[in-house]
């Protein structure tokens, strides 16, 4: 019987599977390499691979999403990833400046009039629409800046190549690609920072009574963006853990759906 089985070693980045050509199913796993996977690699595992190696609980998976997607935690609490800490901090500072500026942009004539008639005070309910709009716009711009400043996806694509010759070629391409990305990020960040500084300086100089209100609105919108990952990331784990714990191991669509939700 053993002679009838032909085994093939298949390399998937940092983990390896032994697959039977005849039965076309996973038979064994190299757990030594499994332990070298970081959060991003674990969360992006193929369904059949995850069935074998992802033994995390719902809470552990939830924490992994929070560590990747909550900006304060992602920036200041070290995790094993392939992003530069200096770029993380730069991204965080630009993000906060972005929230401050977008909130100032959406101070309408009605808001200014209400502040004037109330001698520098304003009803909080008036500011809710501008806080929500500025939060959405800031989040969208922040996503674009993340694409330019984070390098983990590029590094992981390089790790998948095992041939020495191809790896050297890919390494050079990844290096050039990352240099261009980082250069664009710093150019855009510097331009945005100068604009933010100039706009906020003029705004606060002209509308003196709005300074405290602007800071409050900014902290609220920025706080919302920092808190919503704790809520929205409760969903992916429900579908992922259900798919991985399924009795017949046939919930691949549910598993992929959980990965899709985790991207939000």
Image (cartoon, rainbow, N blue to C red):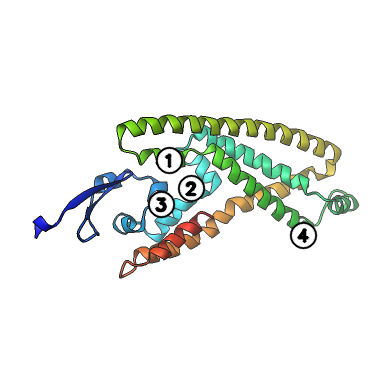
Going from N to C along the chain, the mark reached first, 1 or 2, is 2
Going from N to C along the chain, the mark reached first, 3 or 1, is 3
> Spatial distance from mark 4 to mark 1, Cα to Cα?
41 Å
Q: Which of the 4 image quadrants contains residue 159? A: top left
Residue occupying image coordinates x 31% and y 70% = 247
Going from N to C along the chain, the mark reached first, 4 or 1, is 1
Q: Which mark is residue 125?
A: 4
Residue 182 vs 225, above or below: the answer is above
Q: Which residue is mark 3?
A: 44
* Picture mark count: 4
Q: Which residue is mark 1?
A: 81
The quadrant of the picture occupied by the N terminus is: bottom left
Depth check, front residue: 23 or 29 = 23
Q: Are marks 1 and 2 in contact (CB under 8 Å)?
A: yes
Q: Does residue 6 appear left or right of residue 77 in this picture?
A: left
Q: Nearer the viewer's eye, disc 4 or disc 1?
A: 1
- Please state the horizontal and vertical placement of residue 33, each as a whole percent of the image: 28, 44
Secondary structure type for disc 2: helix
- Please state the horizontal and vertical placement of residue 21, each as a whole percent of the image: 21, 56
Q: Which residue is mark 2?
A: 68
Q: Residue furthest bottom?
A: 247
Secondary structure type for disc 4: helix
């Amino acid at each position: 019987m053993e002679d009838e089985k032909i085994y093939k070693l298949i390399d998937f980045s940092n983990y390896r599977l032994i697959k039977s050509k005849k039965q076309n199913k996973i038979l064994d796993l190299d757990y030594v390499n499994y332990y070298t996977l970081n959060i991003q690699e674990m969360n992006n595992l193929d369904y059949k691979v995850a069935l074998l190696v992802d033994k995390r609980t719902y809470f552990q998976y939830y924490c992994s999403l929070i560590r990747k997607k909550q900006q304060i935690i992602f920036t200041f609490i070290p995790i094993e990833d392939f992003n530069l800490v200096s770029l993380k901090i730069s991204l965080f500072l630009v993000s906060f400046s972005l929230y401050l500026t977008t909130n100032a942009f959406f101070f309408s004539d009605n808001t200014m009039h209400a502040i004037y008639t109330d001698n520098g005070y304003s009803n909080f309910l008036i500011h809710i629409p501008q806080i929500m709009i500025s939060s959405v716009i800031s989040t969208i711009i922040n996503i674009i800046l993340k694409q330019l400043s984070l390098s983990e996806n590029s590094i992981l694509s390089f790790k998948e190549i095992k041939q020495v010759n191809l790896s050297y070629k890919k390494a050079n391409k990844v290096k050039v690609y990352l240099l261009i990305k980082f250069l664009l990020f710093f150019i855009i960040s510097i331009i945005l920072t100068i604009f933010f500084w100039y706009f906020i300086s003029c705004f606060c100089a002209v509308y003196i009574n709005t300074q405290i209100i602007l800071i409050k609105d900014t902290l609220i919108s920025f706080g919302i963006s920092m808190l919503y990952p704790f809520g929205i990331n409760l969903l992916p784990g429900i579908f992922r853990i259900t798919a991985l714990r399924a009795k017949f191991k046939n919930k691949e669509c549910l598993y992929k759906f959980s990965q899709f939700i985790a991207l939000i």
